[in-house]
Amino acid sequence: MIPSLRRSFNEKFTVAKYEAMQDWIARQHGHRAVFRIAETPVFIPDDLLEKVKKACDDVIDVILQPDFKTRTQGALVMDKNVPNEPAHSTFLQMDFGICEDGNGGFTPQLIELQGFPSLYCYQDLASRAYKKFFPVPDDYTHLFNGLTSESYIELLREVIVGDTPPAQVILLELEPHKQTTQIDFWATRDLLGIPVLCITDLKVSGRSVYYEKMARRSLCARSTTGSFSMSSGPAPT
């Protein structure tokens, strides 16, 4: 969407480089993505970026209204309610489509909003791969607020793991080895040091939820699915 960058990228693109990039991504965490990795990043100009940020702020303003949970109580059937949930989701991810605005410009349109981390580690991996194999200027970044890849991963570690022993923080999924997006699971496992578990790996004893690891039990304290948390005492916030 920035013509000069698009021309430069297209002129220097080769299938060989693209295949080398895919191979490099696969080697980082021992898994080749089964979904198609885009041949190119999207170069977003500052004016469109500001529109996206504004759209995010507008959605967040609605969610942070004091009566939001009361107003949306009927959105879930009763058996889907999660006990001890906090007032707000730790994560909030918005997916936008970029549409023509009818005046020769572009505007973001919200596709969906998710309250759990999705592809957070993979997206950083893919962005680093584009820069490694293609001519992306150093002053263009996929991150905000001055974050680097290193500080971004540390922020994820602070939010997801915090002061909890990593063995007690799990990435929980139903049959993770069968999920299309599993490359993000293994990246999260390697970068944050937390295990990836299927829900069938969990065992319950009284109020404790645990999984077997190297012939000993590891107590589950947190789940990074965002669906629920588990501990032998009060649920963590």
Image: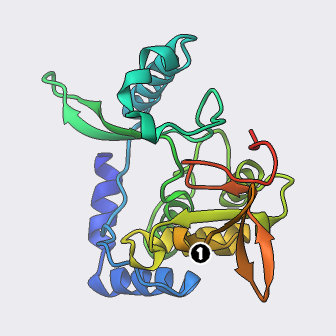
- Residue 2, given in percent of the width and then of the height, sits at 32, 46
Query: Could you say which is closer to the camera, residue 184 or residue 178?
Result: 178
Q: Quadrant of residue 175?
A: bottom left
Q: How many marks?
A: 1
Provide the residue designation for mark 1: 201
Q: Residues within 10 Å of mark 1 (few under 14, many from 20)?
A: few
Q: Is residue 151 above or below residue 66?
A: below
User: Which amino acid is tagged 1?
Assistant: Asp
232 relative to 51 in the view: left or right: right
Query: Could you say which is closer to the camera, residue 131 or residue 115?
Result: 115
Task: Assign the C terminus to one quadrant of the image.
Answer: top right
Q: Is residue 104 above or below residue 198?
A: above
Query: Could you say which is closer to the camera, residue 20 or residue 163?
Result: 163
- Residue 177, given in percent of the width and then of the height, sits at 45, 79
- Residue 145, given in percent of the width and then of the height, sits at 65, 38
214 relative to 86 in the view: left or right: right
Helix, strand or loop at mark 1:
helix
110 relative to 123 in the view: left or right: left
Q: Is residue 103 above or below residue 141?
A: above
Q: Quadrant of residue 48?
A: top left
- Residue 94, given in percent of the width and then of the height, sits at 42, 39
Snapshot colouring? rainbow
173 relative to 230 in the view: left or right: left
Identify the residue at horizontal 78%, vertical 72% (top origin): 218
Identify the residue at horizontal 70%, vertical 55% (top origin): 222
Q: Quadrant of residue 168?
A: bottom right
Query: Could you say which is closer to the camera, residue 159 or residue 174?
Result: 174
Identify the residue at horizontal 39%, vertical 72% (top origin): 179
Q: Is residue 92 above or below residue 40?
A: above
